[in-house]
Image (spheres, rainbow, N blue to C red):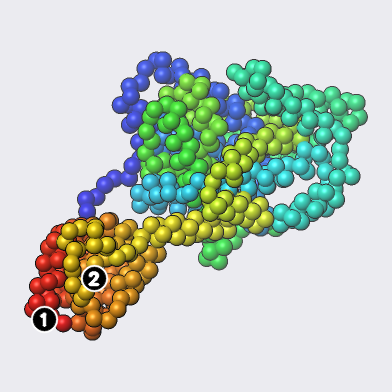
Amino acid sequence: MAFSLPPLFAAWRQTRRAGYSWQALRGDLGAGVTVGIIAIPLAMALAIAVGVAPQHGLYTVLIAAPLIALSGGSRFNVSGPTAAFVVILLPITQQFGLGGLLLCTLLAGLIMIAMGLARAGRLIQYIPYPVTLGFTAGIGIVIATLQLKDLLGLSLSSQPQNYVEQLGLLVQALPSIQLGDAVVAAVCLAVLVLWPRWVPKIPGHLVALAAGALLGVALERFGVPVATLGERFSYLLDGVRHPGIPPFLPSFAWPWQLPGADGAPLPLSFELIRQLLAPAFAIAMLGAIESLLCAVVADGMTGSKHDPNAELIGQGLGNLVAPLFGGITATAAIARSAANVRAGAFSPLAAIIHASVVLVAILLLAPLFSYLPMAALAALLLTVAWNMSEPRHVLHTLRIAPRSDVLVLLTCLTLTVLFDMVLAVGVGLLLAAGLFIKRMSDLTDTEPLPKHFHQALHDLPEHILAYAIRGPLFFGAAEKALNVLRRFTPGVRVVIVEMSAVPMLDMTALAALDNVLRDYRHQGIGLVLVGTSPRVRLKLRRAGIHRVQGQLAYVQDLQQAREKALRWLDEGHS
């Protein structure tokens, strides 16, 4: 096999072939600024949702987004924190702290790089739609539930990981609702729903957060308390604690040097890596699905074509480097990438510019972020959860899909909500694979050939039987299909099997066919295989199933099969 270099910088090669111009530069500048403004509050809100300080979401955009844009395979993908990861990352943060979360992200980055180098990008397209729709809908439900606390200003006695217990605590905490938070949330939700209909060119969430911040300040002046980001989060500078997020760039630190769940540095060990490996694999799989799905959407909007393996490597590099500077898990976001395309982006430079906007915001606007109400950020994530859950698509699928697909969708949704994403994706894929195998095995059958099927079958002696196998012979169908060849009355001396409709066979089918031949050998029965494709004959020869005089023969058509069978009878090979 010839050695090939990793598919890096594919998006930039596509840009060069498309031809770059001043008009393209203007489009990238405008799109980068637009998407950067959109990304700032979302990055902070998503970081809070996964249980870490809001600046870690901004660091993710600052580090991962330009690195992925530089090395990835899609011209229009914009990467950063996404809502899809909340369900996976929050339990990691609760159990292992910030250090564990960043280490898990680093491991996921390594897995994605390995997937890209192994050219696994095309395999993601084989994940069934009910699986992705089920777990994204379940993620939306969980995210929406998590926002109720800040949306209403509720005081919870604890933060359980179990969804049912969490829901029960929220119901019990309803008497602690805060009027100021509820009012801010209601106003922000109204703006988020109505503003895009009135002024679609200006991001509605930016207006909603500005309105929420102004309303929060006004309510505070009237003595109505409103929880703000500055009250919830703070940073230490020169021994003095300041509210909000730090107005300076992140510094390099190994994840295991950062605090764990107990506040102490996380000791790096094989046992820790073993515990984080399963969620890291789930993060890598979900990141690959999200990024490649996002690239497909962008391709459909622009007529371009992404390189899936390069995109996986780019996403892996971003998630490998970002945790070293405090960034959490990143992947391409469909909403931001679509906004990037609509704003006129032409190349990955737009994603780099969007990260530069976040850099400016960190350095110049950080003190203002402390005035953002937590209820406003919760309202923003509530709309994100609604959009990603796609309730219309879910209901439509439940109405029109086959029962097996409905079962897969509901299973993934339920497991995501009640347990976790790792279990939901694993069970969903196994269930979908099992149902697919069942459907494919139903397409494979073995039936006796009637006399009228071909003139060569007319007046065949009763010692000769003819069958036809149709469909792929694989582990789910081989035994059922080939067992039919054993069910006939005694006295048969030759069996003809028409196999022109068999496109492939696997090791299970080869073993089953070998068993049939052994039975025939003991009973003195010859087997004539008709119309086998070159690929099937090659597999049979490699498996040691060769032509045997009076026992096994390959022919091209039924007329040759008739002549061979009659000759065997005449020669007395029994």
Which part of the image, by quadrant, shows the N terminus? Answer: bottom left
Which part of the image, by quadrant, shows the C terminus? Answer: bottom left
Q: Amino acid at mark 2?
A: Leu
Residue ID at (59%, 45%): 398
Which sits in the foreground, 95 or 391? 391
Mark identifier at residue 572: 1
Residue ID at (44%, 36%): 296
Q: Position of residue 49 (x, y in %)?
A: 67, 43
How far apart marks 1 and 2 lie (CA) works out to 17 Å
Above/below status of 4 relative to 373: below
49 vs 232, left or right, is left
Q: Position of residue 522 (x, y in %)?
A: 23, 84
Q: Disc 2 on helix, strand or loop?
A: strand
Q: Is residue 370 visible?
A: no
Neighbourhood count class around disc 2 (C-alpha, 10 Å): few under 14, some 14–19, many 20 upward:
many
Q: Which residue occupies the extreme top position in the image?
A: 23
Which sits in the foreground, 251 or 531? 531
Which sits in the foreground, 14 or 201? 201
Neighbourhood count class around disc 1 (C-alpha, 10 Å): few under 14, some 14–19, many 20 upward:
few
Q: Position of residue 103 (x, y in %)?
A: 55, 53
Residue ID at (37%, 17%): 21
Tag count: 2
Q: Quadrant of residue 475?
A: bottom left
Q: Is residue 407 visible?
A: yes
Q: Amino acid at mark 1?
A: Gly
Residue topped by disc 2? 465
Q: Position of residue 464 (x, y in %)?
A: 20, 72
